[in-house]
Image (cartoon, rainbow, N blue to C red):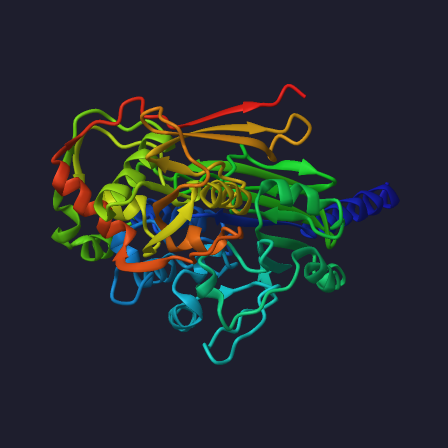
Amino acid sequence: MRKLLLTLAAICLFGIAASAERKEVHILSVNDMHAKIENMPQLAAIADSLRGLYPDLLIVSAGDNRTGEPLNDLYETPAYPMVVLMNMIGFHATTMGNHEFDAGGKGLGDLMRMSGFSYICANLEPAPAFGVAPRPTQVFDVNGVSVGIVGAVEINERGTPDTHPDNCVGLSFTPVLETVQKYRGLRDECDVVILLSHIGYDADVEISRELPWVDLIIGGHSHTAIDGGEMHNGVMITQVTNRLENATHTTVTVENGKVVGRKAEVINVAGYPKKNKVVEEVVRYFSDNPAFQRVLATLTAPMTSYEELGCMMTDAWRVETGSDVAFTNTGGVRYDTLPAGPFTVSDVLRLDPFNNDTVQLELTGQELKNMLIATHDADIEYGFPKVSGIKCEVIFDKKNPKKIKDLKITMEDGSKFDLKKTYKVATNSYSASIADSPRKDPGRSLNRTTASVIQAYLEHQGKIDYTGACRVFESVSKR
C-alpha cells in the first residue's frame, strides 16, 4: 500500500512538473493602421483588457503606422501623433512599412528617436546620418518564454519600398528572403520565432516555404483580411485589413521550449464598446484643428468606387492645370467610398495624403500610351491608372492576366486619340517617377501639391456628382 501511494505521489509530482513547463505567449498585433488616430482609444482599451488577463502581453505592428490621416500627416512633426499614441498604448515593436519612409530618412530618424518601442527591420541598412538604426532582430521575454522577432519591409523592382523614390535617398535595402535567412539562428536561441513582415499576403505565403524555422508570420502591406490565423507550410500567418478596423490576438502555447499550439482571433477595433479615456483626450487634443473641417463642395450622391474617386481626382488635375489629359496611379487613390454631403479639406487630404507635386508633361499620344502601361506595371498590385480626358480599353494577356497585351485609347468624347499628336498631360510626381517609359519631356513641377489642386477644383465646382463614372474598361484577350 505504501509503495502504491509513493508511486501515485510520484505520478502527481511528475504531472505538476510537466504542466509547469506549459506556458502561453499572448500577442496583440495590428498592421497598416495608416494613422487612424480616431480608433486608438478603442485599441488602447483592448490592450488594457488583454493585459488584465495576460500581464506580459506583447503588442506589435507590421508597419504602415502613418500616412492617410491629415491630423497626423500634417502635424508640425509629421506622424508625431501616432508615435505618441503608440507609446501610450505600450507597443513593444513595429517593423517598417513602405509608408514609414514618406518623410524621408530624416523624418524617419526623428520619429524613431521619439518612439518608446523598437523598429525591427533586417533588410533596411542603418543610416547614421539620419539617425536611422533599426534592429534586425529582437528577443523578448514573454511570460518566461523567449520570443525572437525578425522584421522585413517589401522592396520593389527599383530596390526600394513603395514610396516616392526621393524619400529613400541615402537609405539602402537588401532582398527580403536572403536577408531574413541570415537570422535562422534565432531558432536555436528562442522558444518562439516570429517574422514581423510588411511584404504582403501572397509574399508571406511564398516565403513561408523557405522558413520552416519560423512559427508565426505577422503580416501587413496587402490589407488582407485573415479570419484568425492560416497555416501555410507549417507556419501560421495572420493579417487584418487597414485603418484599424480590426486587430489580431494570437496565443502561442509552448511546452518544454517547443511550440505545441497556435490560435488567432480577430478583434473588431472600430466597433469595440470601450475606450481608454486618457487616450481619447489626447486624440481630442490632436483633432482640434477646424481648418481640416472646412467644406469645399457638396457631394450630391455618394462615391462608391475607386474609379469614381479616381475620375474626380484626375478631372481636378486636368481642369485646374489646363491640360488635355490627366492620370494617377491607382495606388494613389486611398479610399473607395465617401457618403453624400460635405466634401471637406480632411476628405481630400485622406484621399491624396502623399504631398506629391503636380507635374505637367508634353507627350505624344504614343509616349502617353507607353507611360500609362509603365505606370500600371510599376503599380501592378493596384491595377491600371485612373484617367481624365480619355477612355481606355485595357486588354490583358490570357496566359498572364497581369500583363497588358493591348491598350486602346479614345478621347473622352469618343473622338480619335492621335498617337502622333502632342498632348498636355497632368499627373503626380510619384507616377512621373515610377513610369519607366521613353519620353522626351521629363515633366516639370507646377509647384502645387496634387491635394491643393483637388481642393481648388472642388471649390470651383460647388456641387459634384460622379455616379457611375467609369473611363477604364478591362477585358482578357481571347488568345
In x, y percent, where is residue 129?
Answer: 48, 80
In x, y percent, where is residue 91?
Answer: 44, 58
Q: Seen in the image, is 86 located left or right of residue 54?
A: left
Q: Nearer the viewer, residue 255 or 116?
A: 116
- Quadrant location of residue 141? bottom right
- Quadrant location of residue 15? top right
The residue sitting at 27% across, 55% down in the picture is 449
Say if residue 29 shows up in the picture: yes
Count of numbered circles in the view = 0
The residue sitting at 17% across, 50% down in the picture is 292
Q: Is residue 281 above or below residue 476?
A: below
Q: Seen in the image, is 220 located left or right of residue 279?
A: right
Say if residue 280 shows up in the picture: no
The residue sitting at 61% across, 63% down in the picture is 123
- Quadrant location of residue 398? top right
Q: Nearer the viewer, residue 343 or 22?
A: 343
In this view, the residue farthest toward the top is: 478
Q: Seen in the image, is 332 located left or right of residue 249?
A: left
For the N terminus, give its image quadrant.
top right
Q: Is residue 8 above or below residue 411?
A: below
For the C terminus, give its image quadrant.
top right
In x, y percent, where is residue 6?
Answer: 83, 47
Q: Nearer the viewer, residue 319 or 417?
A: 417
In this view, the residue farthest toward the bottom is: 129
